[in-house]
Amino acid sequence: MLARCKTAALQGLEARPVLVEVDLAPGLPGLQLVGLADAAVQEARERVRSAIRHSSLKVPLTRVVVNLAPADLRKEGPAFDLPIALGLLLASGQLDAASNNEVWSAGELGLDGSLRPIRGVLAIAIAARNHGARALVVPQANAWEAALVEGLRVWGAADLGQALWRLQHPRARPAAPARAHAPALNPAKALIAARPPADDLADVKGQPHGRRALEIAAAGGHHLLLCGPPGSGKTMLAQRLAGLLPPLDPAEALELTAVHSVAGLLDSSQGLLQTRPFRSPHHSCSGPGLIGGGGQPRPGELALAHHGVLFLDELAEFRRSVLDQLRQPLEDGEVWIHRARQRTRFPCRITLVAAANPCPCGWFGDPERSCSCGEGQRRRYWGRLSGPLLDRIDLQVVMRRPSSAALTAPFRAHCVSPTRDESSAEVRARVRRARAHMAARNPGGCCNSRIAGGQLQQVLQLEGEALEVWEAAIQHRQLSARAGARLLRVAQTIADLNDQASIGATAIAEALTYRSFDQGVTR
């Protein structure tokens, strides 16, 4: 007898439909798996047989052939355990075929028949809904994740026996998805106001130039490089950028949750991700770890920071071959990973923040401490950063160590600061106002950093004097076409923060102060 069940195989951020065909034929008892299955899928033979036996069901004592179609699509992971088990029960007559009609399933089976959570359930649920599935059966621990997809019935099961009961009683009311802090399963309702970040911008003392650059980066989505000696506040500033960004909208939250689901980083206590990510990989990170990859490609740090912040501390300590892989993803907002049998896409619309010392010892240019590095050492140090990569970083800021008076002022009871450092909430309000201007003006409501080069002339308005300053800057600093366009985008962000409809000469002049490396300040 031949039986069929439907499931899906992960391919990057998407799931492709897979038909599980189970055939019982005369011959010696055994289970054979075909269809380009990896080792984890091949091992399903033992898990499925044991799970069926411990669920008080019968394992067919005949030859069983399981085909995973399409045969040229690579399948990996234990998510095929449940559909293989259901197909085996269908083929042996222990499950009614009508109850499995247009029902998809996915889950890992334990030897005792229990169902364990798997990764990528959100992508599988989206694929099931898009292909007209009547319902989706998943482990109980993954039910809340699948339920984020509207228009699809989700049946969570704790074990194989419960999954069979759900199929045989489709009209029974399903149990509520179990999670520690269950939000509404509609993504729009699940986005409650996130708690303010623990790291507040008011904690950063001094550094007005760096604080302003951070605000511009948050408003326009511009990449930022902070260069300065140890203790100048580079890391403190970078850690506060995510707190300046506006909240995720429902579409962004669902896409970000899907990325983390495919990476296997979700648990039931998180639910729909509501806060923008902040990822900070170590400088020893490999190319696949940063960009993504592997035999069956998975998201790297770049994709995991989607809609958030990727912080690369000690930028010049990263291998140049790794950093150069960032060039195209930073430009396109997505990374493509090519393998012999597949081509995988991961989204990575991030705000890059990098921090670096001016030299190996860190004290080049410091007015109080002398540098012990030679000119050749400094050139080799900065030679790890290619010109094309620096050209893609809009804001380049040289920082100095704050004075002792600025650091000790909060501890002096009698000292009253003439100016109060702004908090993250105050800056965030300006960022949201600037983003509202961008949404009303830019094509598709994108940030200024995402305006296509061919649309700059139609979208941006330059005053006459600003045009002259811009032209002189390109000529004097010998800016590339890309750097010149990025200078203009930064100036537009400054104008938006100042509630100005057009770009003035002062906005261009301020944007020029964030191009510190055009003339080799640190080299």
Image (tube, rainbow, N blue to C red):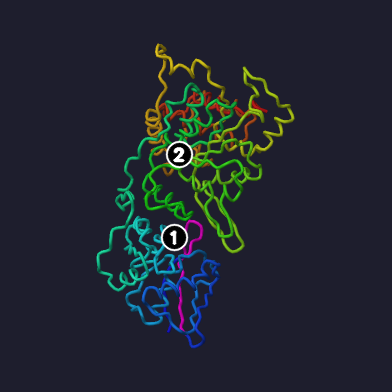
Which numbered circle lies on residue 118? 1
Q: Report helix, strand or loop for mark 2.
A: loop
Q: Residue at x 46, y 70 (%)?
A: 47
Q: Residue at x 47, y 17 (%)?
A: 408
Measured in 3D between alpha carbons, the distance from the residue under mark 1 to the one under mark 2, in whole angstroms, is 35 Å
Neighbour class for label 2 at 10 Å: few (<14), some, many (≥20)? many
The amino acid beneath tag 1 is Ile
Of the pair 515 and 213, the residue shown nearer to us: 213
Dividing the picture into quadrants, the one containing residue 104 is bottom left
The amino acid beneath tag 2 is Cys
Of the pair 497 and 351, the residue shown nearer to us: 351
Magenta stretch in the rendered image? 9-24
Provide residue 520's location: percent of width, then percent of height.
Answer: 66, 28
Residue projecting furthest to the bottom: 26
Q: Is residue 457 above or below residue 397?
A: below
By secondary structure, the bulk of the magenta-drawn segment is best described as strand
Going from the N terminus, do you reach mark 1 or mark 2 first?
Answer: 1
Which numbered circle lies on residue 275? none
The quadrant the C terminus occupies is: top right
Which numbered circle lies on residue 447? 2
